[in-house]
Image (tube, rainbow, N blue to C red):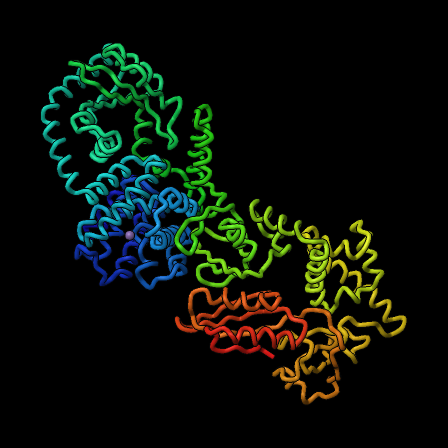
Amino acid sequence: MSGGIDSLCTALAGYLEPQISEEVQCAYHFAVVAHEGQKRRSGEPYITHPLAVARIMAEMHMDHQCVMAALLHDVLEDTGISKTELVQRFGEEVAELVDGVSKLAQINAISRKHVQAENLRKMLLAMTRDIRVILLKLADRLHNMRTLRYVAREKQRRIARETLEIYAPIANRLGMNSIRRELQNLGFQTLYPLRYQVLTTAVKRSRGNRTEIVRTIQDTITQRLAQEGLEGIVEGREKSLYNLYVKMRDKHRPLSEVMDLYAFRVIVNSVDTCYRALGVVHNLYKPVPGKFKDYIALPKVNGYQSLHTVLFGPYGIPLEVQIRTGDMNRMAEAGIAAHWLYKSGEQERTPRGGAQRRAREWLRGLLEMQQDAGDSLEFLENVKIDLFPDEVYVFTPKGKIMILAVGATAVDFAYAIHTDVGNHCIAAKIDRRLAPLSTPLENGQNIEIMTASTARPNPAWLNFVVTGKARANIRHYLKNLKREEAIQLGRHLLNKHLLNYSLTIDVILPECLQNLLKECELENLEQLLEAIGLGNRPALLVARRLVSDWDGKEEEKSAVDGSICRPLKIKGTEGMVVTFSRCCRPIPGDPIRGVVTAGRGIVIHTERCKNLAGFRSQPERWTDVEWADEVQTEFPVEIRVEVENRRGVLATVAAAISDTDTNIDNVSIDERDGVISSLLFTLEVRSRDQLARIMRRIRRLDMVLRLIRSKH
Ligand code: MN
């Protein structure tokens, strides 16, 4: 065991300052205690796994935060340790890395069954603000693949497939070829053991015959380079088994044909020498026309640089030759990880600073190199999506991935699913919890939209939707409203906001209204209401504007004649500011009491309200109030519906409410056990009678167990 940490420290001593090793040992001992008693499937203590992952990080010469995070990468998920504790002990940066890796693990669990490989890869990258998290994840996966033989066969196959579809392509995208190769070969071996076996044997057999030829060609090229005064190393190169397999599979070629290719790599010390060496080998053997590729001038998407050519070798054998510099070769093996190569003397210990910046510089460099390339647009698109996300990736309830613009809300999501879903949405569940429709979505969330057939788009949505599709659809809906409908909707929205100030549009002083109309260059109230209804003016702002004007006017007016026509036609409140208590939410028809409250005027409670009891001893503060005969405003009221926890219950109840032409202002849900859900609706009603009608309608639903008007 201790041999493990010792050899890690030796590896670190090769490129880190000595005092770093103490911090790493601390992380190690912490992880040992955290995983105490846990075992790997192989029977070894669990700590061997994080230690091996840390070892891979050290081989990549990653910074010490990354190595520490590797040692700790499973403690959040598998032990009782909290992120806060990691922050306290090892600092923000290490804790963030560990947290990032743990989050990726959750994503995998969600989407296992519905592999949309490309989107999932994007999502993994988009979720990662720090690219080192991906490197950690790749190292984690690499060690799990190396020890895969211990887990059950079915699980082996699943993990191997996921490795080939998700992780190897990510390694490839990041230019990390040595990890990519190993992941592919291990994945191939696990998924197709028989093919792997057959291919291994065949390759071994044919390799035996080739050794002689390879050495001859190697020597010939080396000598010729030397004659021309060029220094270079010539290596014979083996194709990876997985690559051979893919070639056979995709191009329908027999092994003899895909093997019938001798591959060499020439490593030289400068770009200039690469081109000269190319001249030398073209001079030595005739090039096959159309096979030359200059990836130095036009690097591959992942930054790979090299010259590739194919030659007619001795005895007519085709020779594949790659020519590149030592730097290019390191890049080709380590890719983005090459940029974390720790440089001692570099004083970069600020959290998230240095390495992140270097990675960005690397990407910027790639962009510049790529500018002349034909596929630069596509490349830009890829880099942008992968590493500078301006999109969010979320799941539908069935595990499909939807891609939306950053800042998109549940309403945007609903419209992305289908226009009808958007037009009728009433509530959203984000990761199984109800959330306001305006909530901006985050990567990896699971989104479910509740709809009701009678629900309609709300102009207020225009204030928060970000996608063109949602905006266009809401506008389209509003534009097609008949003029009267728009006015009605506008009146409703405006009154809803004015009610917070115990006002309605009908009692606003004509003077205040005229001021506002003049300001907005509108002729009459109808036009204003229509503009609100069509979504051209936010009701909230209009209401605020009216109220601020009103407040000034009101004081003047009260001062003159001492009385004022108060908005809500409650008798006995003349000249007083009236507000409706939120604790009991009185609605017209409820028996009510007014309480004079300093600073708030008269507060109206229902007679049953528990908070009234507190005022019993102060009768001087009570005042008799009564509803006016015709109250035309809608008041918020809360009802609690307890239902059997079946699929779609919320939508059913919501539809029943909408059937009575009642607006649902808000919904929240309380799933206390698996059996019963408690739904809390805030509705807008004009009267007790209307509420009674709604409650009768809901009671008819067979899944409803209990229904009460709450808090009154
Ligand atoms: Mn792990």
Q: Is residue 197 above or below residue 534?
A: above
**Left or right relative to 701: residue 454:** right
Q: Nearer the viewer, residue 559 or 666?
A: 666
Instruction: Please name the residue shown 68% across and 72% down the image.
Output: 686
Q: Position of residue 667 (x, y in %)?
A: 54, 66
Residue 581 shown left or right of residue 285 in the figure: right
Picture quadrant of residue 593: bottom right
Residue 243 spot, x, y in % from top left: 24, 33
Q: Is residue 98 visible?
A: no
Q: Residue at x 36, y 37 (%)?
A: 174
Residue 271 image offset from top left, x and y in percent: 35, 20
Residue at position x 74%, y 81% in the image: 626
Q: Is residue 83 above or below residue 220?
A: below
Query: How many labels sit on residues?
Result: 0
Q: Pick the residue in front: 400 or 283.
A: 400
412 horizontally vs 158: left or right: right
- Give the percent coordinates (x, y) of residue 206: 11, 27
Residues 664 and 503: in front is: 664
Residue 450 in view of the camera: yes
Residue 613 left/right relative to 191: right
Going by the picture, which residue comes out furthest to the right? Answer: 560
| Quarter placement of the C terminus | bottom right
In the picture, the quarter occupied by the N terminus is: bottom left
**Image quadrant where residue 259 sits:** top left
